[in-house]
Amino acid sequence: MTVAQREGWRRPGPTAEQRRNDIWIGLGMTGLALVSLTLARSTGAFLLGPPPSGAEQLFWTVAVTLPLIWRRRWPAATLLVVSVVFIAAQARSAPEIQFSSWALFCALYTMGAWGQDRQLSRRLRIGVIATMFAWLGIYYTVMIDHIPADSFSEAVGPVPPALAAMVTGVLLNVLVFAFAYFFGETAWVAARREHELRAQAEDLRRSQAEARERAVLGERVRIARELHDVVAHHVSVMGVQASACRRVFDRDPGKARTALTAIEQSARTAVDELRRMLGVLRASAGTDAAPPTAGGVERIDELIERARAAGLTATLGVYGDAVALPESVSQAAYRVTQEAVTNTLKHAGAKLLDVRVRYLAREVEVDVTDDGRGGGGANAVGLGLIGMRERVAAHDGDLEAGPRAGGGWRVRARFPLAAPVAPQRDPSDRQQATAGTEPSA
C-alpha cells in the first residue's frame, strides 16, 4: 500500500456486535459514574466548590457518560458532546469528576481509533485538548482567589503551594490527553495494518488460484499438443498406407501386404504412445511420475522410414557436429519435424521429402521441405501449426512455415542453445551429410 493509499484509507465502520458492545460500555460507564456521584455526595468531597441541586448533579453525570453508547458509530459527535458537557459540568461544580474524566479519555481515544477522516480526526482532537487546557487555565485563574488561607497549612516544600497544585494538575492532564491521543492513533494504525495484511493474503490467494489455473491450462495445452502429435501423425500414415493398399490390393498382393504391415505397426506405435500418456495422467497427485517423453532428434530417422513406407522419396541429412541437446529441446525438435512430415503426408500431395538437422554454433535447426502443392498451408490456422509455434516459442526459438519460391512447402525451426556444447561423436552415425558441405536447399 502506497503512502497516498494509506492516507486515503478509511477504517470500516463498527460491526453490529461492536455497536452492541458500545451500548453496554456506555450504560456501564453511566452506572459507575452514578455510583461515584453517590459516594462523593456521601463523603461531602465537593472539590470544585458548592454543588448544584441533586437533580442537576444527576443530569450532568448522565449527560457526560451516556453518549459513549454511540462512540464508534459517531466518534466526532460523541467527542464534541462529551467535551462540551464535561466543561459545563465543571463550570457548574458537579461533584462527579472521576468517571467523567474517563469518559472524556474514552471519547478522545475513540476519535483517534475510529475517525474516518484522519485530517479531521487530528484537528478535532488537538482542538479539544487545547480547549481543555484553556479551560484549566481559566479555572485556575478564577479559583486562585477563592482558596482558603489555611488550605496549605501543612505545606513544607520549596515550591509555593498554589503553584505546586496547578503544576500537578497540568502534568496530570498532559499525561491523560497524551495517552488518549497516542493510543487512539496506535489503534488506527493497527487496524490499517490488519487491513493491509488481509489484502495481501487475499492477493496471495488470488495469485495462487491464478497460478493453479495457468498450470492446469498449460497442462491441458501440453496434453492436447501431445495427443495431436501422436494421433495425427500415426493416423495420417495409416490413412496413406490404407489408400495405397486399396489401389494395389488386386494387382500386387505383396505391396498390399507391406502396406498392411505398416498400418499395423503405426497402430501399435500410436496405442503405445497413448498408453504412455494416459499412464502419466492416471498417476496420483502425490506420485512423482516421470513426464512423458516422445524421444528426440535421434528418432527423426523413424519418421523418414514411415514416410518412405507411405510412398514418399524421403531423405535425412544431419550437418555439423552432433551435440547432446537438452531433453526438452530435442523432444521439441522431434515434434516439430513430426508435425511437418504429417502435414506433408496429409495435405501436400508431395513425392519428395527432405529433412535436415543442422548443428550450429549456438543453435540447432530442423528444416523440412517437400515438393508438394503447398498444402501444408491448409493447416496453417489449425492446431498443428499452433502447436509447433508454441513448442518453438517455449524455447525462445524461431519458426518459419510457408511456401518455397521454387514450389513446395518448408518448415524451419531454430532452437537456441544456452552455451556451446562439446560435440558428441557416435561411431554408428547414419548416412547423414556430416562429412561435407551441405547441398543447397
Image: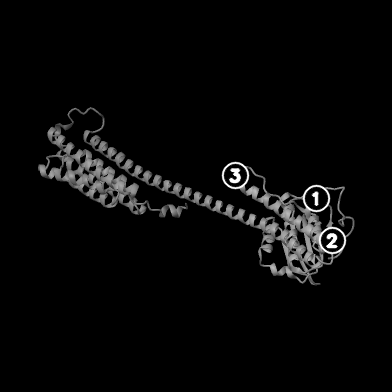
- Secondary structure beneath dot 3 equals loop
Counting other residues with Cα less than 10 Å from the Cα at mark 1, is it few (<14), some (14-19), or many (20 or more)? some
Nearer the observer, disc 2 or disc 3? 2
Cβ atoms at labels 2 and 3 below 8 Å apart: no
Name the kind of residue labelled 2 in the image.
Answer: Gly
The alpha-carbon separation of the residues under discs 2 and 3 comes to: 48 Å
Sequence-first tag of 3 and 1:
3
The alpha-carbon separation of the residues under discs 1 and 2 comes to: 41 Å
Q: Nearer the viewer, residue 188 or 257?
A: 257
Q: Is residue 220 left or right of residue 89?
A: right
Figure quadrant of residue 183 = top left
Q: Is residue 314 something that shows in the picture?
A: no
Sequence-first tag of 1 and 2:
2
Q: Nearer the viewer, residue 132 or 358?
A: 358
- Secondary structure beneath dot 1 equals loop
Residue behind mark 2: 254
The alpha-carbon separation of the residues under discs 3 and 1 comes to: 36 Å
Nearer the observer, disc 3 or disc 1? 3
Residue at position x 21%, y 46% from top? 66
Name the kind of residue labelled 1 in the image.
Answer: Val
Residue behind mark 3: 284
Residue 404 placement (x, y as % from top left):
78, 70
